[in-house]
Amino acid sequence: MKVFLPEENNHSSISDRGIVTVFEDKNKTLWVGTLNGLNKFDRTNEAFKTFSYNPSDSNSINNDQIQCIYEDKIGRFWVVQVKDKLIDPKNEVFSRYYFKEGRFKITKHINI
């Protein structure tokens, strides 16, 4: 077993020790949701790509506290935060979803 820890000034390290959820998608990509961002693990290089909230970047995820990662029956990949998002893991494109009156709608696609 190998332990991965966040390292200051290392952008390929995991974003936080506070791991909330771990998910392997249908393409065998490992995703780690932490209290400080979403991490995509590159098994070949043993490195992480982190997706973090940036208030000055409207294309960033909208919250760093990841609660759940899930892939539904039709292949949509959900990253649940305070506000839900749908991610296309192949193209790394986020869509924000907001629930209103029992229904949800896409408000914007976000390329990352």
Image: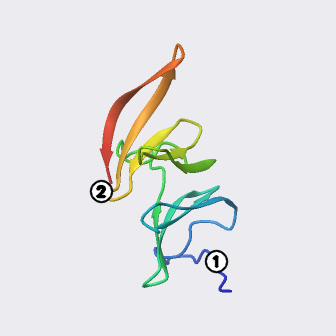
Q: Which residue is mark 2?
A: 91
| Side of 112 where 72 appears, left or right | right
Q: Position of residue 13 (x, y in %)?
A: 53, 76
Q: Can you give x and y, in whole percent of width and height, for residue 63 in the image?
A: 54, 45
Q: Which mark is residue 58?
A: none
- Answer with left or right where residue 94 lies relative to residue 1: left
Q: Residue furthest front?
A: 73
Element at label 1: loop
For the C terminus, the image quarter is: bottom left
Residue sitting nearer the eye, 32 or 29: 29
Residue where numbered disc 1 is placed: 5
Q: Which residue is rendered at x = 57% and y = 66% of the image? A: 15
Three-letter amino acid code of the residue under disc 2? Asn
Q: Position of residue 17 (x, y in %)?
A: 68, 68
Q: Nearer the viewer, residue 90 or 74?
A: 74
Q: Residue at x 52, y 37 (%)?
A: 84
* Residue 65 seen in the current view: no
Q: Nearer the viewer, mark 2 or mark 1?
A: 2
Q: CA distance from mark 2 to mark 1?
A: 27 Å
* Quadrant (top left, top right, bottom left, bottom right) of the N terminus: bottom right
Q: Give whichever of discs 2 and 1 has the lower sequence position.
A: 1
Q: Determine whether the residue tagged by mark 2 lies in a helix, strand or loop.
A: loop
Q: Is residue 109 left or right of residue 103?
A: left
